[in-house]
Image (tube, rainbow, N blue to C red):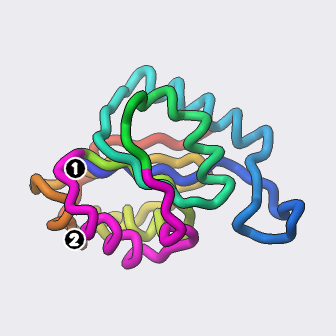
Amino acid sequence: MQLHLLRHAKTNQISPTGKDFDRKLLPRGFEQLQEFKEYYAEHPFQVGYILCSSAERTRQTFDEIKALFPNIPITFQDELYLASFGEILQIINKSQSTADLLIIGHNEGISDLASELSGDILLLKTCGYVCLEFPFESSALISKETGMIVGSFRVS
């Protein structure tokens, strides 16, 4: 199975409400997502399920790419907001998905997750993407250093 990890695109440092949860994408973030869509056009992948943090910036990131994944079920999860790699891994394991997953989240958790699962040191910049492949048929079995990096994208 494959696990696709995408960090949200570039955001404002401050939200109108003053809450980190409400931060919105900058114009540069939308440009990054256009670059990601161009990458996707050359390196398409399919997923069976999408898990996305419920924060404004991750929702906006998903909204910009949702046309790439028509009719794919998505769950917005508060628990993914600023989650640690261990918390994200618990969510992945608990889903017990047999379909490839796309997780849209935040740093440091999303980069730490990619690093822990692959055994490589990875830092996903804004709108950074990595695909990990696992020798399992269920996300319940995903654990440290069991994944292999088979694709990645970093905006210029």
Crowding at dot 1, Cα within 10 Å, few <14 / some 14-19 / many 20+, comes out as: some
| Residue 130 in sight from this viewpoint | no
- Of the residues shown, which amino acid type is indicated by label 2? Ser
The reply to whether residue 137 is in sight is yes
Residue at 58% from the left image edge and 59% from the top image edge: 54
Q: Position of residue 46 (x, y in %)?
A: 31, 33
**Image position of 81 with respect to 57: above or below:** below
Q: Are marks 1 and 2 in contact (CB under 8 Å)?
A: no
Is the residue marked by circle 2 packed among few (<14), some (14-19), or many (20+) residues within 10 Å?
Answer: some
Q: Is residue 78 above or below residue 156?
A: below
Question: In the figure, residue 21 lies in which quadrant?
Answer: bottom right
Percent position (x, y) of residue 115?
A: 37, 66
Q: Is residue 90 magenta?
A: yes
Q: Quadrant of residue 122?
A: bottom left
Instruction: Point out residue 23 in the picture as x, y percentages from the top left corner.
Output: 76, 59
Asked if residue 12 lies in the magenta stretch, the reply is: no
Which stretch did the figure color magenta? 75-99
Tell me if residue 4 comes above or below residue 121 in the rendering.
above
- Whether 96 is drawn above or below 79: the answer is above
- Alpha carbon separation for disc pair 1 and 2: 12 Å
Dot 1: element? strand
Task: Tell me where residue 69 appears, x and y as whole percent.
Answer: 42, 31
- Hey, which quadrant is residue 71 in on the image? top left
Earlier along the polypeptide chain: callout 1 or callout 2? 1
Q: Which residue is mark 1?
A: 133
**Which quarter of the image is occupied by the C terminus?**
top right
Q: Is residue 150 left or right of residue 64?
A: left
Residue beneath disc 2: 143
Q: Which amino acid is tagged 1? A: Glu
Q: Nearer the viewer, residue 8 or 99?
A: 99
Query: Residue drawn at (84%, 61%), measured in percent from left and top?
Result: 15
Q: Measuring 27% from the left and 62% from the top, which residue is drawn there?
A: 95
